[in-house]
Amino acid sequence: MKNQGLTQVYTGDGKGKTTAALGLALRALGWNKKVCMIQFIKGDKKIGEIKISKNYLPHFSIHQFSKDTRFILKANKSDQLLAQKTLKHAEKVINSKKFDIVILDEINIAMSLKLITINSVLEIIKSKPKKLELILTGRNAPQKIIDAANLVTEMKMIKHPYYKNIPARKGIDF
């Protein structure tokens, strides 16, 4: 069981889901593991995790397919096509067995917006390589995904600076 890869879900309305996944990635990189983060719905190339992965972390790659946005409130057909392209890419990365950890960032939102199906993600979970650690992030994780996961953490918002008109800060929030 020591080398068994698990499926983890970070969900909830609180801040920190992607940050928790990045913390896990950093720890794994310290042990020479290879990590790939595939971001659904995100397309901003100027975020800190992309900058550091390109400049300092050769075993950490981040893939984005979405347009230059950080958050989608209402999805359209273009968003659906991009999410489905991202999911197909994720399947190839997972099945390539080149990585020890694959993070599917904001995939839960992609499912909740019906950009991709829950069943397609369940199939990925079920068929992933045994040693692969699979991380799914994003609010609104479907119950079927929660049931299929080995570890689920819910971030609960108690207080958030957004509601005091404090914008996201470079190096802290992105």
Image (cartoon, rainbow, N blue to C red):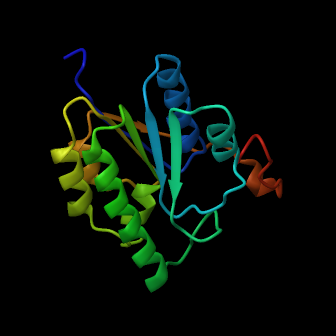
Side of 124 where 58 appears, left or right: right
Residue ID at (81%, 54%): 164
Which residue is at the front of the view, 36 or 172?
36
Q: Residue at x 44, y 85 (%)?
A: 77
Residue 110 locus on image (x, y percent): 42, 64
In front here: 158 or 126? 126
Q: Quadrant of the N terminus?
A: top left
Please indicate whether residue 74 sits to the left or right of residue 103 in the image. right
Q: Is residue 156 above or below residue 79?
A: above
Q: Which residue is drawn at 47% across and 23% down?
A: 28
Q: Where is residue 30 in the image (x, y as percent from the top left)?
A: 53, 18
**Quadrant in which residue 10 is drawn:** top left
Can residue 66 be seen here? The reply is yes
Quarter-of-image position of residue 96: top left
How many labels were placed on the picture?
A: 0
Residue 76 visible to an observer of this rendering: no
For the point 83% across and 53% down, which residue is it?
166
Identify the image quadrant of residue 111.
Answer: bottom left
Q: In this view, does 141 lie above or below 72?
A: above
Query: Toward the viewer: 11 or 173?
Result: 173
